[in-house]
Image: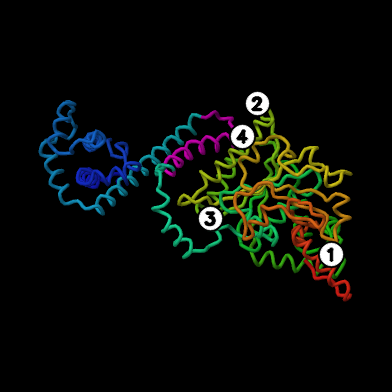
């Protein structure tokens, strides 16, 4: 099949002459002279170039003017066509070209141009493979191919970067959303925690980056893994777990089974669950449910790789295993400096900041479908000593962005920043009843759930003071249980004071 159509190019030129205003407003950001086939003849390319110059100079686009400009160029075309006769045929055709014909020919010419370019990209990859050293590594081979190919793909995914009048497109967008309420098109799939959904909405909407900041051993991996596991199971969205040299695949799998089945982790790790009929039944039931749902939660160890190698792998994985246009959640455990040799002149905070920035560009610019991001990132970062609880009371614990170690750019690039920590002694003592041993505070949220005011406003305490709202969590055998937010606790404690006189048990949160 030919990768060009000279007749469609002729129609495109005629349509541009007939409808110059429409071409400028709707097609100029898509079609250029480079999209015309020129291996045999540059006639169409040259004529189109002259037409565009006249349009840009706000001059009349007529055949006589075009002929004059072509003559002044003193160009001889290989096909030895009579330029006046050719231009006359263009002029006659332009009087019959409709807007629909112009749009159709522009689409055909552009698609053929893309196919020709990608065909040349294939030749470039072939040349690159032939010129590489015989002892180059597998990663070098793939990286070279990816760089050539993805640069071409990026060119065409971004060629329609034209400013849009939001008021003109608003109506169509609003009705489109009402007619298609898919979880991939609005607020994203809801997570397993009702309180977090009410305050923040989904943490894994396409294009979003959610970062959990917590101290060592507090439960960063537990929280992100449990959240992503539940999303994968309930909404059938695949998860790619990227482990940055922290935990093996066995450790992650055992923890996930402990969370899902309720069987203690030590019994799963030792294999002793098999000797207990109750635990054996729970494990087998859990495995049956997991296999029946065909849940995809895939593990890959990226320890020792730099950020460019990680992103190259993610791109390959997405296009080969998930497919363009399908949702994916990346669970990256966790953000830390990789100290690449190529970055020896950069500080640690610069390396980490660039890491998050590159992840953001990958999921918001590269892995998109119809201009809509389809991939989300959930990850975590270490809290510094300022955010350590230790034996402090709640008044002396810092719960803001200053607890983030490594780089403040982490907050800048993320969609949600959540601070997770253990409760202090006085917070545990104040609890009217047991509400878990962890609290999670929202430091940044780019979008909210149904209760925006509750997420943003301070909560008035019984003594008249005000506190920032937080969610109570209990980490039980690697299952993260939601015990409501601070507002829920206060309301329930008020009900306790009322109900205690009647010796009635307080309602659960």
Q: Secondary structure at mark 3?
A: loop
Compare marks 4 and 3 and give the one earlier in the sequence.
Answer: 3
Q: Residues within 10 Å of mark 3 (few under 14, many from 20)?
A: some
The disc placed on residue 326 is 3
Which quarter of the image is occupied by the C terminus?
bottom right
- Circle 3 or circle 2, nearest the eye: 2
Asked if the residues shown at circle 4 and circle 3 are in contact, with their CB atoms under 8 angstroms apart, the answer is: no
Q: Among all residues in the image, which is located at the extreme front?
A: 464
- The boundaries of the magenta stretch are 132-157
Rendered residue at 37%/43% (across/down): 114
Q: Is residue 454 magenta?
A: no
How is the rendered protein coloured?
Answer: rainbow
- Circle 4 or circle 3, nearest the eye: 4
Total marks shown come to 4
Q: Secondary structure at mark 1?
A: helix
Compare marks 1 and 2 and give the one earlier in the sequence.
Answer: 1
């Amino acid at each position: 099949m030919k990768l060009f159509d000279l007749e469609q190019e002729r129609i495109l030129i005629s349509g541009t002459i007939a409808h110059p205003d429409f071409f400028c407003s709707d097609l100029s950001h898509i079609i250029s002279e480079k999209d015309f086939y020129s291996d045999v003849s540059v006639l169409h390319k040259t004529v189109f170039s002259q037409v565009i110059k006249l349009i840009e100079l706000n001059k009349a686009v007529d055949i006589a003017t075009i002929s004059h400009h072509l003559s002044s160029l003193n160009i001889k075309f290989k096909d030895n066509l009579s330029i006046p006769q050719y231009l006359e045929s263009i002029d006659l055709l332009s009087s019959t070209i409709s807007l629909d014909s112009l749009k159709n020919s522009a689409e055909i010419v552009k698609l053929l141009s893309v196919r020709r370019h990608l065909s040349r990209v294939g030749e470039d990859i072939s040349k690159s493979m032939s010129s590489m050293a015989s002892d180059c590594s597998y990663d070098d081979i793939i990286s070279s191919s990816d760089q050539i190919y993805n640069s071409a793909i990026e060119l065409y995914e971004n060629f329609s970067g034209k400013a849009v009048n939001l008021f003109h497109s608003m109506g169509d967008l609003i009705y489109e959303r009402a007619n298609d309420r898919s979880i991939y098109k609005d607020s994203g799939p809801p997570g397993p925690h009702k309180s977090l959904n009410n305050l923040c909405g989904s943490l894994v909407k396409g294009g979003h980056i959610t970062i959990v900041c917590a101290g060592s051993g507090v439960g960063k991996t537990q929280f992100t893994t449990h959240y992503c596991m539940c999303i994968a199971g309930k909404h059938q969205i695949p998860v790619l777990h990227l482990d940055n040299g922290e935990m093996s695949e066995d450790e992650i799998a055992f923890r996930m089974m402990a969370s899902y089945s309720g069987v203690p982790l030590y019994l799963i790790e030792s294999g002793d669950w098999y000797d207990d009929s109750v635990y054996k039944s729970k494990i087998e039931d859990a495995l049956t449910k997991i296999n029946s749902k065909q849940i995809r939660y895939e593990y890959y160890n990226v320890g020792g790789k730099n950020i460019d190698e990680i992103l190259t792998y993610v791109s390959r994985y997405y296009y080969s295993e998930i497919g363009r246009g399908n949702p994916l959640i990346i669970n990256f455990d966790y953000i830390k400096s990789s100290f690449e040799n190529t970055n020896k002149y950069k500080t640690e905070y610069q390396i980490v900041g660039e890491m998050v920035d590159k992840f953001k560009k990958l999921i918001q610019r590269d892995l998109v479908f119809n201009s809509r991001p389809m991939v989300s990132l959930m990850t975590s970062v270490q809290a510094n000593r300022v955010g350590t609880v230790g034996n402090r009371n709640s008044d002396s614990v810092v719960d803001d962005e200053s607890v983030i170690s490594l780089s403040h750019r982490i907050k800048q690039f993320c969609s949600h920043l959540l601070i997770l920590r253990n409760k202090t002694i006085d917070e545990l003592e104040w609890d009217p009843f047991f509400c878990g041993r962890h609290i999670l505070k929202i430091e940044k949220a780019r979008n909210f759930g149904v209760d925006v005011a509750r997420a943003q406003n301070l909560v008035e305490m019984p003594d008249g003071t005000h506190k920032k709202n937080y969610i109570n969590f209990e980490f039980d055998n690697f299952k993260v249980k939601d015990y409501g937010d601070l507002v829920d606790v206060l309301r329930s404690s008020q009900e306790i004071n009322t109900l205690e006189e009647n010796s009635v048990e307080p309602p659960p949160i």
